[in-house]
Amino acid sequence: MVIPVAALAGGGVARAAKPAPASADFHWLSDAPPTAPGAAVWGAPWPRGAVKPKTTLTAIGADGQALPLQTWPLAYWPDGSLKWTGHALAGSAKGFQLTPGKPVAPAKSVQVRETAERIEVVAGEFVCRFARMGGALIESVSLAGRETLRGGRLVALNQNIPPGDLSPRETQVFDGVIDAVTVEQRGPVRAVVRFEGKHRGAGRDWLPFTVRVAVDADGRLALTHSFAFDGDGNKDFIAGLGIRFDVPLTDELHNRHVRFAGEGEGMWGEAVRNIPGWQPTKFALAGKFQDQLRGERVPDLAAMDAKTRDQLLTVPVWNGYRLFQGDADAFAIDKRTSTKSRWLRADHGGRAPGLGYVGGVSGGVAFGLRHFWQRHPTGLEIDGATTDAATVTLWLWSPQAGPMDLRHYSDKAHGLEIQYEDVEEGHSTPLGVARTNQVFLWPMAATPTRETLSGMAKATTDPALPVATPAYYRSVGAFGGVFTPVDTSTPVKAKLEAAHERLLGFYKKEIEQRRWYGFWDHGDVMHSYDQDRHVWRYDVGGYAWANSELVPDLWLWTAFMRTGRADVFRMAEAMTRHTGEVDVHHLGPLKGLGSRHNVSHWGDGAKEARISQSLLRRHYYYLTADERTGDLMADLYDGDHALLAVNPVRKVAAKTNYPTQARSGPDWFAFASNWLVAWERTGDTKWRDKIVKGLDAIAASSHGMFTGPPFGYDPATATLYDLGSAFTTSYHLVTIMGGAEFVFELDGLIDDPAWSKAWVRFCAYYNAPLAERQAALGPAAIDRHFAYPVWHARLTAWAAVKLKDPVLAKRAWTEFLAKTKTGQENSPEPITRVTGPSVLNPIDEMEGVSTNQSAQWALNLFELLALVGHAAPDSLPAGWE
């Protein structure tokens, strides 16, 4: 029997009604429409059966006018109807509706022309030329026949001496070289060109990259830059990593301008040669200084009298400019007259949004690097502003910071018992870790106003994104639909929601308070708190960075689905970008596996599919249609083969005659989540069949879901083998790494009665009283195999719904609200202020907080409210009041 979770209502499950009408309303995240030119790209979910694959969709604004729209499929329901669609929208209506109909094209539709030598993307008088080979990915960009940008290329700097070593060092320069080019989208609102290649120099090719360039109908280029580290972390120290291009300059020096955005609406701006407005009695055109500062045209040299011209030519010209964000709280702007002169400090500030501009009154380029201050050390550099073409470099890692150090934090092993750190020779390696950054380029026909540039700065830090309401997401069964919009309908529910809000707000503030920022760190949170030191255990083995342990990713994404809040979305987005790239090995012998929590993101010896699994990426991919996240998930379709190199239970289980071993959870559930993505993205049922094969194998094993959890496993045939190891180890990891959420969603997609029976049996007895569990399962089913009842209350709730058992529904709430065995409350602790000499700076802390507990408590709360919300108690236990 299939009972769609999407049909959850009032704490129960009911069979879905006929498909809802194929229309959906969208508004802007943060309730802010676009502040700069550029297509908005996002994903829209649909009810099962409502939108057929050949259905065309149109966007209708609140005023009834159609908006230019481009549509492509992202995922399919089992019946072949569209589950998610990707869209690109031109325009900035306050709100709009997607509905069946013929879409309208923009006034200047994007078109793609291909030849053997290059790819040309055209939108009216806006022309972009892309290379098929060589080092210049972007050959040129022209506006109305005038070239505004050329030579878009990649650069990397490397040193073989670690930071702090004063030995003589040589900086090696590497240039990006194209291996392959693909046109992925062809308009009319947006075209996408994908480049793959490596950095070449010093006799080697390394640092493989993928760069996508999206060209919008309104003249913006959006670049997604991804690279993987394939060097030796003990010998290769990247000293600079950037995107570089040239901006042709034809205006006279006093009609050329440079801009850097600061905090808020702040904008630093000067001309390459400033008019001496400080000499009003001596310089005839001093009154034009304000015009010049606004970026407006001032008289050319030929229009000046000889004296004025000669006076102006004595004013210094500034050839180089740079903005360096050295840490999260400080940036500096410098300029210099030539490479033979020193840098002069021009200004400074706190957090730069990463936007700059160089050009003249006849045209130039505005450029933005997203997450600029969060991913320090970053930089924007302009060289050659006095020549016929300025060179701009957006430094993802600025050379001003010195080389990055990817070595492990220690050269000795530290054990699991005290440090909670798994140690294995050769596994504490950065080989294969990756990072993705976003860059925006706006070719301009004239120097923009400062207000216009401020809008571009905001668009860089907070790109416009259409979203739907939580009620709509739930109604269509998005991600299984086991959530409700925030529910404060009773005093108890209101208190529970307030407790979650306190917990979520604490983490949001903690990111800022602890400065969890930096190129490799941004997006992650810490694992466990050190109450004695009043800091997180940043230096204690496996207690430091969380690395998706117990799926805080799913906590944040589900919190967004319930609230629609922009701040929660941005927290989840940053975490997904981090955990999908930095915490996973994308090449090398560990490819396809993620690293368990550690002081170094990639430092732990345990390499796990639970970290790399697609279940943790799906929300971001489907809500944003982000192609890079799609790549990451596609790379994992055969991720189970990685277990041939790294058996996940190699240190605790005896060897078998099978190729490797896999636990039902978190290993097999992780593989199955990868196959679910492959099935829904391609419609190919071979992926569904692999899932069903595993479900049936578990259901048919000696004890169903109580078998194992380790099984013998053969990736070649996706076959699980019963090892006869039931009730010999703990089951607590089986569902808390996303396994429960995965199976909840799968219930509405696959009709497998044998599996459903085995799963409900597991849910009903996991948290059952010992005597009841042993009566059903046998004397071997002892409590120590069934740990952390509060983390598994959702299983009881699921069984209550499936079995229509009100006693189980009440028991689920009792389990969730009960104290731990040590007498601690399961609810989030109060937030207290700590001052004085026991801390370096005054802080707000939550006693004994752990991200494991926080994520699991929140997810269980969400799921109990959705599954058995009707059975919530009328009052809370002592300690809650």
Image (cartoon, rainbow, N blue to C red):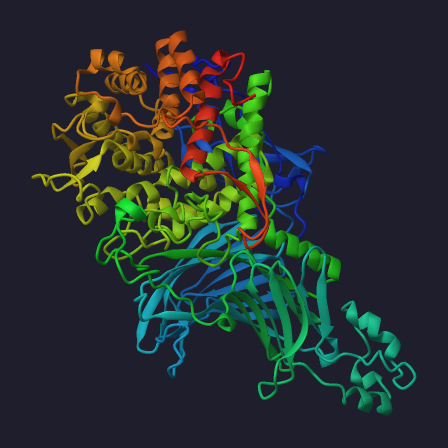
Across and down, in percent, residue 148 comes to 61, 69
Quadrant where the image shows the N terminus: top left
Quadrant where the image shows the C terminus: top right
Q: Residue furthest front?
A: 837
Whether residue 56 is visible, yes or no, is no
Q: Judge left or right: residue 299 versus residue 642.
A: right
Q: Judge left or right: residue 623 versus residue 146.
A: left
Residue at point 22%, 42% (across, down): 648
Residue 312: quadrant of the picture: bottom right
Pick the residue in front: 44 or 337. Answer: 337
Across and down, in percent, residue 650 comes to 17, 44
Across and down, in percent, residue 728 comes to 17, 29
Pick the residue in front: 255 or 148. Answer: 255
Question: Relative to 284, does residue 575 appear above or below in the rendering?
Answer: above
Residue at point 27%, 52% (across, down): 591
Pick the residue in front: 574 or 692. Answer: 574
